[in-house]
Image (cartoon, rainbow, N blue to C red):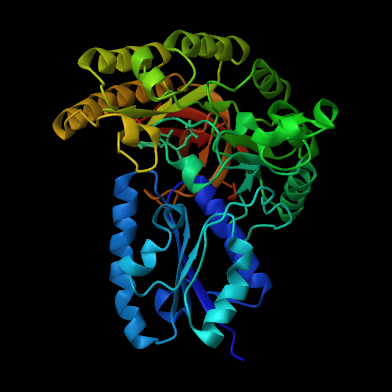
Amino acid sequence: MEKKKYYIENYGCQMNISDSEIVCSILDNEGFIQTDLIQNANIILINTCSIREKSEKKILLRINQIKYLKNYKKNLIIGILGCMAEIFKKKFFKINKIVNLILGPDSYRELPFLIKKILNQNGKYINTYFYNNETYSDIIPKRKKEKITAFVTIMRGCDNMCTFCVVPFTRGREKSRDPISILKECEFLFQKGFKEIILLGQNVDSYFWYGGGLKKNFNKFSLKNNTIINFPKLLELVAKTVPFMRIRFWTSNPNQITLNVLNVMKKYKNICKHIHLPVQSGSNKILSLMNRKYSREEYILLINQIYKILPNCSISCDIITGFCNESEKDHNETLNLMNYVKYNFSYMFIYSPRKLTYAFKKFNDNVSLTIKKRRLTEIINLQRKHSYYRLKKSIGKIQEILIEGISKKSINYFYGRNSGNDIVIFNKKNSKIGNLIKVKINNCTSATLIGEIF
Ligand code: SAM
């Protein structure tokens, strides 16, 4: 039988990119062939995101756009994967009749079997069940050809229950991946020529290996403490296993990151000095409504500790503006906190109410869109100033840069990243993509460093 071609389109966060790589690996192992041309595909998979309404709308529009392809290929399979599968469940079949497969983030192993079933017998299939032990630990994701940076997922799901966030409902509760499989994958990536690893999780500091299963079920487990591997231990193991690779991790939670993590970062040269530490708001009232489990004062103490232990560490964050009951005073407290920390960069969002969340059910989305937009603009403008302030501090310094590719501005220039995750553009000289080189920083814009090979 002719081999079937699949096309996959990805939306959302790094976790989704990593999941799409897992899906490709599962399908390739079963003899399916990936195509980059949607028109050539027998199977179209959309890996979806539900974090904000905007992302969902964009994806629904996209599914409508590709409807016409069904006219040309009667047996075309269209599958919805990931977060939106968990939110819409069977409703997807009704909303869009062209969809024949719906799979949540824990069911990707079933893809080859279900695709073959649809090809042979037609029909529509759905599995949105969360499996307590599924971490895809034995699957090596199929990565892009440029062997520079690889995502390595270390945990799945989230237990934090921030009142605004849909993740615990779309990705299930927290479970960690077997550390042996993580280390093996890192070793494998090094052998394959990759230069950098990004350890991924919704909340990496919560990594907790006690033999498998949900973190919340730990108390039912009898062997307990002597077998536990937590995040600082894992980070140290990874840094030792691949000493010639750069290590990053993403995302940290202010409530769970420990001094041990900072000390491990300090001890190992190959761990990049950058922490993504979403604050969400600078107001204690809003942090409490968001159920973030830390106060503004505790967050500031943490920032001080980071700069004490790692003086040159970059800190970035996520901020949500216009959450329920956010007053002008609360907004100003966010701006004040930003002025204190002076983040290297931030992802900044307007609050988007999400069904299933506590905030959607219990609070009133009572900040008008006009106010939300105005506050967002103020936050973005301030962040721009701070990014410029931070980047300017690098001028005159010699930094170690990992070359990632050719600059969009000119083919005579490469771009890469320093340890703090800033993008640097510089002349090519005799260097190659993938090299770790020294660059002297001569100038900057509000988003990019400009330098020359030293
Ligand atoms: N687990 C991380 C945390 O909570 O710190 C990040 C998870 S989420 C994939 C990335 C970011 O999206 C969050 O940090 C938050 O700023 C933003 N976000 C999540 N839910 C949102 C919502 N309902 N409206 C607007 N932004 C949201």
Camera-nearest residue between 122 and 331: 122
Q: Residue at x 38, y 13 (%)?
A: 284
Quarter-wise, where is residue 154 in the image? top right
Percent across and percent down for residue 151 are 60, 47
Percent across and percent down for residue 127 are 54, 62
Residue 231 as seen in the image, left or right of residue 372: right
Quarter-wise, where is residue 281 in the image? top left
Q: Residue at x 16, y 31 (%)?
A: 368
Q: Is residue 69 above or below residue 279?
A: below
Camera-nearest residue between 162 and 197: 162
Q: Residue at x 39, y 44 (%)?
A: 51
Camera-nearest residue between 401 and 354: 354
Q: Residue at x 29, y 29 (%)?
A: 363
Q: Is residue 68 above or below residue 266?
A: below
Counting labels gives: 0
| Residue found farthest to the bottom | 1
